Amino acid sequence: MMLSGETLREVVRAIPPSWLRSRRWFAGKSRDLHSLDLFDHALISDDPLVALTLIDVQYTDGPAELYAVPLLFEGTGAPILTFKSSPVSDALEDRVYHEMLPRLIAQRVQCGPVRFEPLIDLPEEAGEAKPLGLEQSNTSIRYGRSWILKSFRKLAFGENRDLEVGRFLTLEAGFPHTPQVGGCIIYEGRQTATLGVLQRFVENEGDGWAYVRTHLQAENAPNAPDDVYWAQDSLPQRDASLLDDIELLGRISGEMHRALGSRTDLPTFAPEPVSEADVQAWVADLEAQRAAALTAAKTTKGQVGEEARQLLAKRSFGAIQLEAHALRKIQIHGDYHLGQVLRTADGFSIIDFEGEPARPLEERRAKQPALRDVAGMLRSIDYVGRSMSQEGWAKAAGGRFLEGWQRTSGETLEPRLLCLFELTKAYYELAYELNNRPDWAAIPLRGIASLLAEAA
């Protein structure tokens, strides 16, 4: 079969919208899809016949989205459609394509506008391929116990932060607590976008959220108010090791921020001073998140909606005065919480530097104070504790995390700015829960009440 651009355009336009909506990685499930068209393509292989297509998804309202879908003709995967008597399937759901990708990267193959690039010496045989079913926005394949290839589906033009930051930390800064970046797949056509990142597989016991919940359950600590008393009078010995782990996570997080701010000679990573305009923007963001939560609360029935409306009716933060010369902005993780760290034999490994998925790439690449990451992790610790009625443990754990972070980060701790960032995150959490899981809304509500008391 000849695969001209026009042939592929016919195939792309024939893809059923129902197939797209059935994919975990497709973000436009709730939107009214207008049409599909071929943005660009690259012929990856003649035998089997694989074409990597970039699909322009147009909606009846709002901006279009761009998705990467490699198409395998006459493959063994579940077909998307039948085109000229040949089944067409998503190549990333087929073992043949899985096994092809590491070889293409190791061999530095160029396929039209798509470049496969090794960043270190790589073996052509990476190990047995096994798809991972955990991601919502990407498709990942594990190769033995050596590598993971993350293929990005929804694309943003510019260098992906997972590649940019991961490559800097492992190849420039020598930071050992994140997976080494071994290679990448880059689209260099009409614009530039990252299609995939090859990273070391990290042996682990699960992510930090699952690890903490498992240990809190296993230790069977009593519910509040007993653990409030414990927090004042020291926790029992059986909880000490988990708190030690949280302090270790704080130290590793601080080391990450020290590494991210260590290269003044690289403009993308060189630290910058905080300006008054930055502070005003953070306060405005705080109020925007509060307003979004209040809007959600107005449509939420029952006691939780009433409590939320009363709490959110107050302005959350007055003027904030900072010693601007003592604060700096650096590249940060950008979406830091317990789900973004893996528990390993020697501590924790930090993953997923893409930033908050809902924000534009330019915004995710903007430098921020390290305290924004700290706030995200403190909110995550508070969340997991409150979700298990372990408020006292959460308070103690948050303190230990902060102690560990201060010990290694080299960054200035400005308590009022940290509180602002925590409150901003808590408002976002509340809006999300009110819109999606009202039964969980009490958790961020209690967190907001505590933070407002602290801010006052």
Image (cartoon, rainbow, N blue to C red):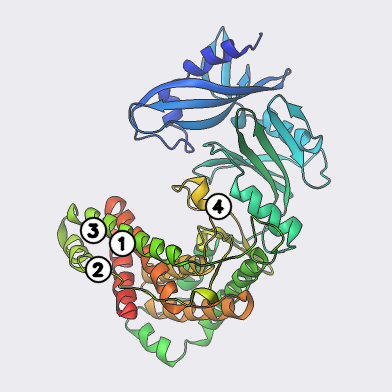
What residue is shown at x 48% (from left), y 48% (from top)? 357
Q: Nearer the viewer, residue 220 or 29?
A: 29
CA separation in Å, label 3 and label 1: 10 Å
Q: Which residue is mark 3?
A: 294
Residue 51 visible in the current orientation: no
* The N terminus sits in image quarter: top right
Q: Residues within 10 Å of mark 3 (few under 14, many from 20)?
A: many
Q: Which residue type does callout 2 highlight?
A: Arg
* Left or right: 272 in relation to 314: right
Q: Which residue is mark 1?
A: 287
Q: Which residue type does callout 1 highlight?
A: Glu
CA separation in Å, label 1 and label 2: 8 Å
CA separation in Å, label 2 and label 3: 11 Å
Q: Which residue type does callout 4 highlight?
A: Arg
Position of residue 271 measured from the top left corner of the image (x, y, whole percent): 61, 65
Q: Which residue is mark 4?
A: 365
Q: Secondary structure at mark 1?
A: helix
CA separation in Å, label 4 and label 3: 29 Å
Residue 303 visible in the current orientation: yes
Q: Nearest to the eye among marks 2 and 3: give it.
A: 2
Q: Which mark is residue 315?
A: 2
Q: Nearer the viewer, residue 20 or 284?
A: 284
